Image (tube, helix red, strand yellow):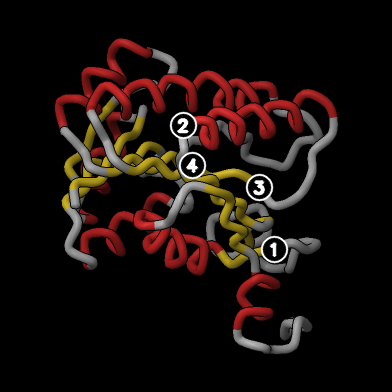
Amino acid sequence: MRVFLAGASGVIGVRLVPLLVAAGHEVAGMTRSPGKMERLRALGAEPVVCDAFDAAALREAVVGFQPEAVVNELTDLPDEPAKTNEPNARMRREGTRNLLAAAEAAGALHFVAQSIAWRLPGDAGAAVAELERLVLAADDVVLRYGRLYGPGTYYEDELPEPPRLHVDEAALRTVPTLHAASGIVEVTDDAHLQRFGLPRTLPE
């Protein structure tokens, strides 16, 4: 399958690229930073430099690759956790809208978008809800990740409050959703533990 991965240089994206390649997929990895192209190429992706807010350029990039699936791992997060984050709210709204339009123009059959498994207040929460509405209205898949922990996340050395999810597990469990039916898929440690009947208390 040809997969266009937006946000390929992010904390999930860099883990997801080699998993997709190992599964036999051809991957275009999108980043807005030219300096990250070589890393994406080394991971096995065809690097694409594009800004998700440039709707015309994004459409051209996605249509040019002709993907069967588009994965939205776009974020605009600060280096440190913040109570409010207007850039990321904009990314959830405008970035998702632009990527959905590009995927439709390319005739992609599958679209998977990251969301979160906990509630945010105010406009941040409204942006999450809008992202999910856009994706579900297009009969596509919403991935609700738990709070990420592990290398490269805000929680490298401690566990965040639940719902939570190790970043390596987040990438691993994203791969099969390329074939999931339209709807919401919750991807958290608790969801995994419940599935296999394991205790919810994780080792510190």
Q: Secondary structure at mark 4?
A: strand
Dot 2 corresponds to which residue? 138
Of labels 2 and 4, earlier in sequence is 4
Q: Nearer the viewer, residue 139 or 21?
A: 139
Dot 1 corresponds to which residue? 164
Q: CA distance from mark 3 to mark 1?
A: 10 Å
Q: CA distance from mark 1 to mark 2?
A: 27 Å
Local packing at callout 3 (Cα closer than 10 Å; few below 14, some 14-19, many 20+) is: many
Q: Secondary structure at mark 2?
A: loop
Image height of 111 relative to 152, above or below:
above
Residue 73 in the image, given as x and y percentages of width and height: 46, 42
Image height of 61 relative to 196, above or below:
above
CB within 8 Å, label 4 to label 1? no
Q: Nearer the viewer, residue 183 or 28?
A: 183
In the displayed structure, does residue 54 sit left or right of residue 201? left
Q: CA distance from mark 3 to mark 4?
A: 10 Å
**Residue under the image location 55 percent in, 31 percent down:** 76
Dot 4 corresponds to which residue? 113
Local packing at callout 1 (Cα closer than 10 Å; few below 14, some 14-19, many 20+) is: many
Give residue 116's mark. Answer: 3
Give the amino acid type for the residue marked by disc 4 in the picture: Ala
